[in-house]
């Protein structure tokens, strides 16, 4: 994958932390010194609660701290403009509210979302966002 800027959703981070088939691709993106990874603070929260449920609070803390420690990762706040954009995407249905923040951020920055979540496909088909597809596993 060429260096560049990407939005990673919770699916990508969960695949990374879960050592799923997409883990090497996500790792390459995170460790690319020429790239930039954006993550909405809402999606970071989704990763955090998912890891608490699947593992433990301590494991979630450690994973999210490591996510934030990557020099390529920029965490984006949930400003009113981003909340409004996510709500507008959500109003047409088909995507979880948290995923709407990743989609909205990708639209705002004109960069692709990295995910394996098929709920993003309709937005890609409508040319609202571009997607780098990860394998599901």
Image: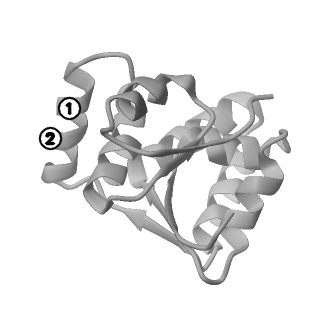
| Tag 1–tag 2 contact (CB < 8 Å) | yes
Q: CA distance from mark 1 to mark 2?
A: 5 Å
Given residues 44 and 122, the one toward you in this image is 122
Please determine whether, in this image, residue 118 is positioned above or below residue 80: above
Q: Secondary structure at mark 2?
A: helix
Residue under numbered circle 2: 84
Q: Residues within 10 Å of mark 2 (few under 14, many from 20)?
A: some
Where, quadrant-wise, is the N terminus in this rendering? bottom right
Q: Secondary structure at mark 1?
A: helix
Given residues 111 and 40, the one toward you in this image is 111
Given residues 103 and 3, the one toward you in this image is 3
Q: Position of residue 12 (x, y in %)?
A: 64, 45
Which numbered dot is residue 53?
A: none
> Residue shown at 26%/56% (left/top)?
108
Residue under numbered circle 1: 87
> Residue shown at 46%/53% (left/top)?
112
Q: Position of residue 54 (x, y in %)?
A: 74, 30
> Residue shown at 74%/30% (left/top)?
136
Where, quadrant-wise, is the C terminus in this rendering? top right
Q: Residues within 10 Å of mark 1 (few under 14, many from 20)?
A: some
What is the image's colouring? one colour
Q: Is residue 50 left or right of residue 91?
A: right
> Would you identify the image quadrant in which residue 61 lies?
bottom right
> Would you identify the image quadrant in which residue 133 lies?
top right
Q: Position of residue 125 (x, y in %)?
A: 40, 28
């Amino acid at each position: 994958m060429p260096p560049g800027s990407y939005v990673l959703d919770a699916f990508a981070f969960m695949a990374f932390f879960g050592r799923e088939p997409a883990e090497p691709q996500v790792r390459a993106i995170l460790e690319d010194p020429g790239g930039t990874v954006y993550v909405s603070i809402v999606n970071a929260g989704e990763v955090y609660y998912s890891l608490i449920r699947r593992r433990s609070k301590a494991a979630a803390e450690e994973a999210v701290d490591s996510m934030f420690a990557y020099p390529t990762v920029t965490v984006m706040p949930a400003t009113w403009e981003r909340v409004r954009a996510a709500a507008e995407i959500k109003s047409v249905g088909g995507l979880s509210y948290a995923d709407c923040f990743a989609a909205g951020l990708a639209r705002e920055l004109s960069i692709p979302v990295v995910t394996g979540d098929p709920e993003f496909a309709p937005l890609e088909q409508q040319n609202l966002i571009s997607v780098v597809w990860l394998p599901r596993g």
